[in-house]
Amino acid sequence: MRFIDRTVATIPANTAGIKRQYHDIAYASGARHTLDIYLPNEGSGPFPVIIDVYGGGLYFGQKSSHKLEPALQLLAQGYAVVSPDYSLSTQGRFPVQISELKAAIRFVRGNAERYHLAPGKIALMGESSGAHLAVLTAASEATGALDNGMGDYPDISSKVSCVIASYGPYQFDQFAAQFQLLGMTPQFAETGQADSFEGVMFGNHELTQIPALVHQADPAQYLTRETPPLLLYAGTADAVVPYVQSFNLAAQAMTVMGESRVALHIVEGAHHGPADFMTPEIVNQRAHWLAKWC
């Protein structure tokens, strides 16, 4: 079955024990431009912020799903969590999602006092396609690229302090070659074709036919010494996105940004999805990274 043919039931995140929640706040006009805010149960703030970007191949997903739970684990460390919706591929052509996330960042910074948030301490966190969006949003901000000025706060910065990205796709035209290199069979046979999730993301094109669009989507093209520090994760058993994608991005980022500002964890035996990336060890690594950079 193709990725886009699946029936994906939304499993909501478990937020029952979170005392302070704000839902469906518009960060810009239009559909899918709302966000939710979750505050730690203890303290009055201002709280450093994690803006979490869910995955789903830009084809599935919503802000209240269980994919939020890795970020919610960090509430106990004193971080507020913000979960924005954004346009899926059937609703808005890439790269509009980058403008949407930058609008969400500006909204959070512009309304920080109202929601007890620290405007100078905002991190991005994402998984799968959300990891790609998070890294690309952070990296392109320094160059002024991929931003249409959406929202009511165009004069407020959309810069973030750091990024945590798990099992993201970054070199979209390299999936098939990388799976072959690893000796792995991709979970979805259409990988790299026009009807793959990545093909749909680029307007139903085979990836080898659109080098300019693939280049535009590669976060490595925007890296500078000022790119926010990156913490990257990937799993060796991932049959959706080859873990080599994260390895390559980390190597490129270390060259441009310096090794102290980039960290990569390849998790042995980990599959695609949040389940294998919520261990106490990984939570502690993420908390340490945030404490150091955010």
Image (spheres, rainbow, N blue to C red):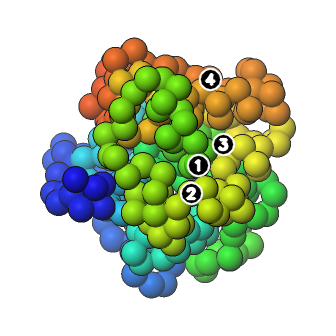
Tell me if mark 1 has few (under 14), some (14-19) or many (20+) residues whose alpha carbon lies within 10 angstroms of its own.
many
Q: Is residue 41 visible?
A: no
Q: Please state if 251 lies on the left or on the right of 247 as rendered.
A: right
The earlier-in-sequence mark between 3 and 4 is 3
Closer-to-camera residue (124/152): 124
Note whether 244 is above or below 112 in the view shown. above
Give the residue type that dot 3 points to. Ser
How far separated are the C-alphas under marks 1 and 3? 29 Å
Give the residue type that dot 1 points to. Asp
Residue 230: x and y in percent read 63, 34
Looking at the rendered structure, the secondary structure element under dot 4 is: strand
Residue at the image position 47 percent from the left and 70 percent from the top = 204
Residue corresponding to mark 3: 161
Residue at the image position 49 percent from the left and 40 percent from the top = 176
How far separated are the C-alphas under marks 2 and 3? 32 Å
Residue at the image position 84 percent from the left and 38 percent from the top = 225
Q: Which mark is residue 207?
A: 2
Q: Are marks 2 and 4 in contact (CB under 8 Å)?
A: no
Q: Are marks 3 and 4 in contact (CB under 8 Å)?
A: no
The earlier-in-sequence mark between 1 and 4 is 1
How far separated are the C-alphas under marks 3 and 4? 15 Å
Q: Which circle, 3 or 4, is nearer the viewer?
A: 4
Residue 17: x and y in percent read 18, 43
How far separated are the C-alphas under marks 1 and 4? 24 Å
Residue corresponding to mark 4: 263
Looking at the rendered structure, the secondary structure element under dot 2 is: helix
